[in-house]
Image (cartoon, rainbow, N blue to C red):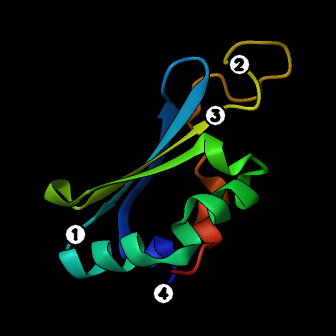
Amino acid sequence: MKLTDAATVIRSKNAGPLQITIDLMFEDEARFDLARQSPSLSPSNLAALYGLQQDSVQVLPFPQALAIKLVFDRKTIAGDPGDRDVYGTQQHGPLLGVEL
């Protein structure tokens, strides 16, 4: 199953000038568990997908909310020259093709 079929919300935003956060929200526990246990959403696979070091990626599941928060370091500080997404709202794109 694709992440886009499992999640009802996939959105990214700033988590300060140095990090991006991506929220994944699910409508039921089965889809949440599928995503939470998927190797595709492991820190190492997400780091490879985004071209980052594995230690700069955190995967934080919140079972009470049926949500997973992904946090990773920005490659460019928000607002610096070369930053193409100052608000971090377009950083979820690489996840749209992920298979769970």
Q: Earlier in the sequence, mark 1 or mark 4?
A: 4
Q: Secondary structure at mark 4?
A: loop
Q: Check disc 1 and give the amino acid type.
A: Glu
Q: Residue at x 72, y 60 (%)?
A: 49
Q: Secondary structure at mark 3?
A: strand
Q: Earlier in the sequence, mark 1 or mark 3?
A: 1
Q: Are marks 1 and 4 in contact (CB under 8 Å)?
A: no
Total count of labels: 4
Q: Which residue is mark 2?
A: 77
Question: What's the distance in space between the residues labelled 4 and 2, CA to CA?
Answer: 34 Å
Q: Earlier in the sequence, mark 4 or mark 2?
A: 4
* Viewer-proximal residue among 2 and 42: 42
What is the number of the mark on residue 1?
Answer: 4
Mark 3 residue crowding within 10 angstroms, few (<14) / some (14–19) / many (20+): some
Check the image and report above or below for 86 versus 75: above
Question: What's the distance in space between the residues labelled 3 and 2, CA to CA?
Answer: 9 Å
Check the image and report above or below for 82 versus 72: above
What is the number of the mark on residue 27?
Answer: 1
Q: Check disc 4 and give the amino acid type.
A: Met
Q: Secondary structure at mark 2?
A: loop
What is the number of the mark on residue 73?
Answer: 3
Q: Nearer the viewer, mark 1 or mark 2?
A: 2
Question: What's the distance in space between the residues labelled 1 and 3, CA to CA?
Answer: 28 Å
What is the number of the mark on residue 99?
Answer: none
Q: Residue at x 30, y 76 (%)?
A: 33
Q: Residue at x 73, y 46 (%)?
A: 53
Mark 1 residue crowding within 10 angstroms, few (<14) / some (14–19) / many (20+): some
Question: What's the distance in space between the residues labelled 1 and 4, CA to CA?
Answer: 15 Å
* Viewer-proximal residue among 65 and 52: 52
Image quarter for residue 32?
A: bottom left
Q: In the rendered view, does 87 fall on the left or right side of 83?
A: left
